[in-house]
Image: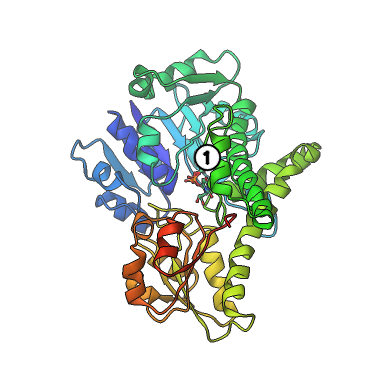
Amino acid sequence: MRISVIGCGYLGAVHAACMAELGHDVIGVDVDQAKIDALSEGRAPFFEPGLPELLKAEHGRLRFTTDISEVSHARVHFVAVGTPQLEGSNAADMRFVDASIDALLPHIGPGHLVVGKSTVPVGTAARLAEKVEATGAELAWNPEFLREGFAVSDTLTPDRLVYGVRRGDDRASDVLDEVYRRPLSTGTPRIITDYATAELVKVSANAFLATKISFINAMAEIAEVTGADVTTLADAIGHDARIGRRFLNAGVGFGGGCLPKDIRAFQARAEELGVGHALAFLDDVDQVNLRRRQRVLDLITDALGTELAGRTVAVLGVTFKPDSDDVRDSPALDIAARLALRGVRVKATDPEGIETARAKVPSLDYHPSARDAVAGAEVVTVLTEWREFRELDPREVSTWTDARTIIDGRNCLDAGAWRAAGWTYHGLGRP
Ligand code: UDX
């Protein structure tokens, strides 16, 4: 099929590359010339395992351009632009979605299908459908559930496909079946529903995941005052198949470009719809999450005393999670920045995130390796659970630094091994 993808950010670039991999002819469009140049040369503008290989594939089915008129050759147009949090509000900024649809309108007509992938407030698709249908084209909403670090496999072999279509619009679902023939042929479940349900599937999935993480972090708060161990608790409740162990890792909490802004935008939309009370609990989900960052700052103060100015702390990991260079709403970078604001010399390192972090928080002292970052530090913190930090040998680290306090913000280290090597170990929600 001939496909266009509007927006070549994180979601769009991965989607375009994966659609070409599935055998389609794809043109990716973005207004950012630098991004288009990088993608055209087979370079991913961000770190994502597996993506460079797809961009370099020599099948000739993948092109990128800044010229929107080139989409007229395609028949299926995916809209994959961002919906960031609006400045000064919790609501989603719909500017890019609206601009993309407006830019598409002159180039579409009967026989074209516009497919929304962006995460949007419920009600958006119905509003946009009127504009799209006035050209004779159709609109479907097909939310994306990809995780950074696994974006390629999540797109090529998704857990499920959701199509939001106009009631009885079999043509739109037939076209999407054709687009996703390969994953469907291997048994990927597909749910065909209305626009509102499809939009809600995405935000409610993210709200559920955020709630699950904050639930275990709330248990960590209780564990901290009772001497219980939240990691054992998570293992034990996770054995119940109804609960499940995944997304029950207590630590500095969730960040990234999706969960934090999506739960806020979902609440804002519920309030607009007059049912804000239904999502009032998401406020607590957000608050529990933010309190965990303060907990790490408190542990550092406990170790160093309240006068932090002039002290030195090593921060291992600044991205919002491993296998990503993304520092959007990163709990790790937020903690590091707050330490720096209090006059701490923060020696930070990260396998992939140093450049993105430096652009956002230039005041940290960035180092290429854990060994360099811990040298001269008085406290060592692990705030993102990259494999190379999980696998640090505490006895070896002892030869790099005089520090003997380790704060494990992700509960990812072997507490016993660190204690045996002479360290004072603090996890979150662990005795
Ligand atoms: C998320 C959703 O998982 C994905 O389906 C959606 O499409 C986009 O948002 P992503 O933001 O890539 O994906 O990250 P995810 O793996 O979900 O992690 C989100 C945050 O939660 C990270 O900061 C991670 O460190 C944190 N987390 C995750 C925990 O603190 N504990 C856990 O047990 C799991």
Figure coloring: rainbow
On screen, residue 338 above or below 281 = below
On screen, residue 146 above or below 430 = above
Instruction: Classify mark 1: residues with Cα within 10 Å, few (<14), some (14-19) or many (20+).
Output: some
In which quadrant of the rendered view does residue 128 lie? top right
In which quadrant of the rendered view does residue 147 lie? top left
Toward the front, the furthest residue is 420
Q: Quadrant of the C terminus?
A: bottom right
Nearer to us in this view, 93 or 323:
323
Report the residue at 48% width, 18% height from top: 173
Q: Position of residue 357 (x, y in %)?
A: 45, 66
Toward the left, the furthest residue is 58
Q: Is residue 167 visible?
A: yes
Q: Position of residue 190 (x, y in %)?
A: 48, 20
Q: Quadrant of the N terminus?
A: top left
Q: Which residue is mark 1?
A: 235
- Give the amino acid at mark 1: Asp
Q: Is residue 137 visible?
A: no
Q: Position of residue 72 (x, y in %)?
A: 39, 34
Nearer to us in this view, 274 or 109:
274
On screen, residue 187 above or below 349 = above
- Judge left or right: residue 401 versus residue 60: right
Q: Secondary structure at mark 1?
A: helix
Q: Position of residue 320 (x, y in %)?
A: 48, 56
Toward the bottom, the furthest residue is 310
